[in-house]
């Protein structure tokens, strides 16, 4: 397994940029459709953008930069108007200037018009200047401090959302609630000025059962400062300090490499809610990608819901959970990450990231009390870890790989382990009118390397030998409506999870999410699903975005 990871790492890094290529910012890409009436000029993209045609795909790419850092600056500006930008490598000839005389006549006509109206322009200018001098003499100069405050406020962008989620559990254990109502919301404030950025995000959640309290309380309500950081862009590098969330991953169902931030156990596990981490980073942009050095300063505690909640992971609430984290060293022992990311684009597109970590592992384990009056605690241990996540586009097919190898540092209970996820997604275009159909398949494998230490069951590992088969139906009707469904099949413990989810925007400010999920746990093995019991649920979520 180590050989496979090192081979993939070596292959990715040796894939260098050709001398005949440059770095561009890709705004969007789409599968070529025979009946498409796409008009590039009508989209009003910036002048530096070109429509690039490949065999089975078109892409809108902007600029042709020799240095990766210049492309990164361009991406920063374009991200203000286009959300899903990415830096790619493009052949330089695609941006070669084209000789044309189409615009000569309009320019000549403009010069003639200017000469004919020259006297009028000069006369109007003189009148305007005279009027301006009179106004300056009679009016008080503006307050500079008020102007600065006004300019500061104009540079602040605020956005957020408010969500109401209602869930009904058709099948459930007798000790769990039969329904649940949750109100949640997020508020973001961003200040951007030249190369400086300040950002903060608040998140709040209120569970209906927590209002009445008592034995029905789920302990799922909270107010959390999720992100608060400062960021500054230099000529070919970036500095960041504060609390933020970093997403690392490529797969659809479970991102095994997305382990910089811990998950929030009081939220719906389907949403994969993350808790911000205090850290500092320095990122340097090179000619072939970007290199980041990240130091995480603190290993946070993690709160947990109470037993009436359907996703409480233990079978009894008699033994209390204590959120105080037990660590191998101090909770302030830094976790250091060295990350390299890059992309290539010849006849196909490869995006790759490789990360080395020395610090606390994202995987934690529980220690049970030695007496009935004791508590359950989470434990964190130290690892040296290599992580990689990658995507490769070949025609209408997307290939995905996530892999982790962890060398555990001197722990009596936790073994070295590896975790691999492989995925493939093939898109069939225009299966019905403008709708596309994606065929999804993913396989996950987790294994410990020492039999005398905790295994996957004791670590509550769900995706230890699982196959996912699913479909994604995209309506492409302008409201981002999609239907995603599939089955997760545990090939070792005979468990199944079935789900179907519908999501769409309404009037651009409302978002609708409707899903059905069914869990068929193992009847003989003490898996995480076995602990929580058989479940069937229907969920409706309405969100207002501002």
Image (cartoon, helix red, strand yellow):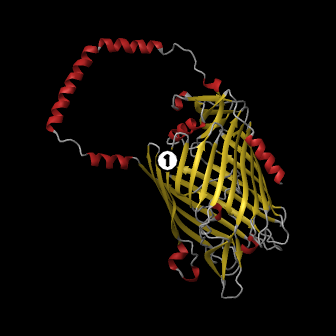
Residue 333 visible in image: yes
Q: Nearer the viewer, residue 529 or 167?
A: 529
Residue 397 visible in image: no
Q: Nearer the viewer, residue 130 or 220?
A: 130
Q: Is residue 94 left or right of residue 455?
A: left
Q: Taking 126 as reference, is 417 above or below it?
A: below
Identity of the residue furthest to the bottom in this view: 372
Where does label 1 land, which residue? 232
Where does the N terminus fall, quadrant-wise?
bottom right
Q: Secondary structure at mark 1?
A: strand
**Residue 398 position by quadrant:** top right
Q: Position of residue 147 (x, y in %)?
A: 29, 45
Q: Nearer the viewer, residue 536 or 392?
A: 392
Q: Nearer the viewer, residue 273 or 234?
A: 234
**Residue 237 position by quadrant:** top right
Q: Taking 34 as reference, is 206 above or below it?
A: below
Identity of the residue furthest to the left in this view: 138
Q: How many marks?
A: 1
Q: Position of residue 422 (x, y in %)?
A: 78, 51
Q: Position of residue 29 (x, y in %)?
A: 64, 37
């Amino acid at each position: 397994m180590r050989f496979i990871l090192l081979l993939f790492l070596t292959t990715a890094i040796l894939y260098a940029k050709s001398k005949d290529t440059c770095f561009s910012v890709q705004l969007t890409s789409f599968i070529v459709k025979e009946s498409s009436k796409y008009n590039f000029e009508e989209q009003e993209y910036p002048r530096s953008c070109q429509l690039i045609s490949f065999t089975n795909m078109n892409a809108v790419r902007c600029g042709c930069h020799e240095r990766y850092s210049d492309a990164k600056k361009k991406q920063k500006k374009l991200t203000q108007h286009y959300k899903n930008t990415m830096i790619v490598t493009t052949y330089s000839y695609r941006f070669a200037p084209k000789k044309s005389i189409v615009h000569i006549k309009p320019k000549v006509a403009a010069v003639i018009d200017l000469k004919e109206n020259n006297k009028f322009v000069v006369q109007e200018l003189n009148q305007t200047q005279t009027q301006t001098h009179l106004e300056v003499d009679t009016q008080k100069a503006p307050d500079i401090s008020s102007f600065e405050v006004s300019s500061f406020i104009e540079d602040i962008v605020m956005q957020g959302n408010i969500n109401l989620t209602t869930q009904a559990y058709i099948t459930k254990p007798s000790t769990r609630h039969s329904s649940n109502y949750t109100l949640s919301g997020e508020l973001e404030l961003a200040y951007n000025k030249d190369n400086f950025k300040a950002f903060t995000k608040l998140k709040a959640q209120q569970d209906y059962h927590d209002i009445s309290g008592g034995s029905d309380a789920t302990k799922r309500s909270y107010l959390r400062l999720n992100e608060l950081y400062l960021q500054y862009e230099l000529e070919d590098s970036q500095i960041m300090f504060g609390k933020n969330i970093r997403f690392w991953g490529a797969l659809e169902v479970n991102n095994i490499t997305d382990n910089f931030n811990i998950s929030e156990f009081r939220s719906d596990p389907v949403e994969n809610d993350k808790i911000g981490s205090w850290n500092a980073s320095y990122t340097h942009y090179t000619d072939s990608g970007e290199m980041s050095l990240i130091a995480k300063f603190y290993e946070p505690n993690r709160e947990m819901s109470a037993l009436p909640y359907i996703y409480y992971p233990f079978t009894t609430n008699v033994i209390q959970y204590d959120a105080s984290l037990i660590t191998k060293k101090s909770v302030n022992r830094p976790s250091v990450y060295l990350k390299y990311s890059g992309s290539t684009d010849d006849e196909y597109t490869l995006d790759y990231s490789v990360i080395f970590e020395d610090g606390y592992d994202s995987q934690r384990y529980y220690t049970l009390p030695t007496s009935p009056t004791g508590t359950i605690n989470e434990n964190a241990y130290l690892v040296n870890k290599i992580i990689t996540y990658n995507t490769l586009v070949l025609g209408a097919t997307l290939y995905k790989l996530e892999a982790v190898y962890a060398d555990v540092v001197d722990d009596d209970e936790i073994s070295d382990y590896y975790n691999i996820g492989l995925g493939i997604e093939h898109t069939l275009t225009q299966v019905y009118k403008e709708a596309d159909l994606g065929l999804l398949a993913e396989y996950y494998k987790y294994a410990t390397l020492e039999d005398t230490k905790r295994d996957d069951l004791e670590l509550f590992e769900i995706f230890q030998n699982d196959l996912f088969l699913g479909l994604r139906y995209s309506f492409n009707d302008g409201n981002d409506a999609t239907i995603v469904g599939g089955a997760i099949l545990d090939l070792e413990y005979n468990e199944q999870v079935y789900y179907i989810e519908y999501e769409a925007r309404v009037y651009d400010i409302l978002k609708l999410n409707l899903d059905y999920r069914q869990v068929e746990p193992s009847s003989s093995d003490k898996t995480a699903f076995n602990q929580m019991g058989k479940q069937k649920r229907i969920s409706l979520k309405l969100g207002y975005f501002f």
